[in-house]
Image (cartoon, grey):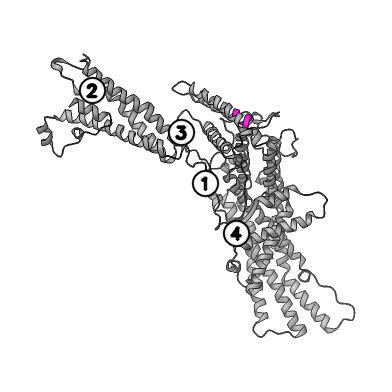
Amino acid sequence: MLHEILLSLSGHPSPLLHTPPSPEADALAGITPPERQLLSSARHISDLNTNLIAYSTEISTTHSSTICRAVATAISSVHLAAFQRKVLQVEESILKNDADWVGAYNIVPLTAIMGEFQQWTRRLEWLWDTSGQGRGDGMVEAGFRMGADYVCVENCLPSFVTGATAASMIFIGKSLNHVRAMNNTSSSSGGVAHVSAKLQELSTLTLPLENSEFSKAVKAIRTSLSQNTLQKMLPLARVSEMIQLLRDFFLLGRGEFAMALTHEADERVRNRWRRAGNLAYEKDDGLKNITVKDGEVAAVLNRTWAVLVSMQGQHAEEDDQLELARSLIQLHLTKSKPPAALVTGRGLDVQAANVLAASPFRNMLFSVPAMLSLDLPSPLDMVISPSDLQLYSSINAYLLSLRRAHMRLTGLWKITSLRRHYPSPRGASDHAVTLRERWSDRSWLLRSTWTTASATIFFLAETEAYFQTEIVKTLWDDFHAWLIPSQPQRSGHATPIDHHHSRPPSQHSHDPQTLSTAHTLYLRTLTHRLLLTQASFTDQLYALLQHIDHLVTHIHRLHSLFTSLDLEHDAGVVDAFVDLEREQSQVFSSLHNIQLKVKQGIDDVVSTLRNLESDAIFLAEWDGQGLVDDEGEDRGYVPCRVGGVDRLLMKLDFGSWLGGTAWEG
């Protein structure tokens, strides 16, 4: 019986340990209830050992993750081997009639045997839980594959691994994969040798591991890899060039790109109307009936590049950045290429990520979700993650929507015949008098429309100027000064959050992981301070931009009706199938309703800003609470302070002409 128990503990199943179908079976076999309880404990240990042997063998031979294979091999070769040695030790002691085990009349108490293995129960259970995480890679949830981000699962991290250390470990793994993928032995063999030497330091750490010692060893490996390999493979100049490109084209640093893209997109949509023979002006939701295809969206971007190249032809120097942008930037519908998932962390919580994922501003350019994306070349994806590019796309759609609405409204002033009419010469005919009366009536009817359009332009101009100068430019200048310390800081508004976080000038470049962490923090801070994570603000602003679209659409429709009516009255060109007078009356009625919606939309946006100004939680986030990482390094990036929403509210304080009787009139 003892021999069978020891064999079962070694991993060989035994029917002796199975629970009998009835108590009578134990009585017939001579097993008492206390003995059955001890045998149940032995069965539990035996099952754990058997399952661990089978599962660790499977993982160590078939799993795609190097981490999982290493953990499974350690479980099998270290822990299970120690358990097997313990079984052999107990068996040897019994065979040698050791007095600690064998009593009088050569009786070996079962309680003594199970008491010796009881301490292994918790250990084997923990090993089984650890091996069960093998399917999710434990700490790393997504493997190294194109378009995938590494993600830390915090509740799976051991107690001696801090968040910063886990990020460094992920970065080391990504770097080594890049080195292996590039297969550039001339630039990487020496660096890999240095890393191998540093890896030996991990074996010198004593158990139990202390987080300070472990973090110091991982940091040494990361530093060695950065200094000996990554600086050759990923120079700072190349990183700076790509971040500058994202600043210019995604954050509208090059205004001509935004203007050309908006103009070409509007022309493409208007051409769709003309080809379909559908004016789409009669209903507020006419834009929703326009079907846009992927090829048309790509053609819009190609036409935009052509316009920018033609503008460049007037200058002597060639624009290298424009050529690089043409080869990397794409415009596509989101249904054909879904956006990457946003990674949450310091500066971006789950709630803010959900707000960004549901952002509706991608619909403004083509009336269907479309976005700019960047085909990031390797190894720049070590610094700029897919989640970062998704943030850039969200910010671009947001800023581009404001620029588009501003351009469409200012474009109304180009319709000269709607805004002014010339005085009739002295001695003019009755027909000239009739024309003057007609234009005077139209001017009087459109007075409130032009007032609304002017107020809306002022609102958009001040809001866009605040976002671009107070937020985007200030944060970019501060981040660029940190990225390249040799250049002086160009913005007078940027000041450190406090004296404890002021950054002394650095005389050497940052390693890629520090760059990646700083760039992500800069981008998340930019997203917050553009109010893009405040759903109460973005929802009101998006509704206002839709009303502005409808206002512009109805004014264009009214202009075409005026032209048709003039032809009917002056030249006798009559369309028997259209009642122009009735349609004009309907458009005026709709235009009046839309004016009220635009006015109310501006009031709602300003009211939301005032609520945010008094929101303590929002103000704490704005001032940078939670952005400083205590585990970070001395030269870590800390976003600067920028002007609050109170500065925008002061600019939007229109006075009595936007509120009260003048505004209502």
Residue 607 versus residue 154: which sits nearer the camera?
A: 154
Mark 1 against mark 2, which lies toward the viewer? 2
Q: Which residues are magenta?
A: 223-229
- How far apart in space, not on screen, are marks 4 and 1 (Cα)? 22 Å
Is residue 263 shown left or right of residue 618?
right
Q: Which element is circle 4 on?
A: helix
Say which label, 1 or 2, has the lower sequence index.
2
Q: Return the mark for residue 351.
A: 1
Q: Which mark is residue 363?
A: 4
Give whichever of discs 4 and 2 has the lower sequence position: 2
Quadrant of the drawing holding the N terminus: top left
Q: Which residue is mark 3?
A: 157
Secondary structure beneath disc 2?
Answer: helix
Q: What distance separates the C-alpha of mark 4 from that of mark 2? A: 72 Å
Q: Which amino acid lies under the numbered mark 2 shown in the image of this protein?
A: Ile
Q: Secondary structure at mark 3?
A: loop
Residue 76 visible in the snapshot = yes
Whether pointer 1 and pointer 2 mark residues with C-beta atoms closer than 8 Å, the reply is no
Who comes first in sequence, dot 4 or dot 3?
A: 3
Q: Which mark is residue 472?
A: none
Can you tell which quarter of the image residue 272 is in?
bottom right
Residue 91 placement: quadrant? top left
Q: Nearer the viewer, mark 4 or mark 2?
A: 2
Mark 2 vs mark 3: in front: 2
Q: Residues within 10 Å of mark 3 (few under 14, many from 20)?
A: some
Does 535 sit above or below residue 130?
Answer: below
Q: Position of residue 335 (x, y in %)?
A: 54, 58
Earlier in the chain: of badge 3 and badge 1, it is: 3
Give the dominant element type of the magenta stretch: helix, strand or loop: helix
Instruction: Point out the image quarter for the C terminus.
Output: bottom right
Image position of 126 (left or right of 309): left
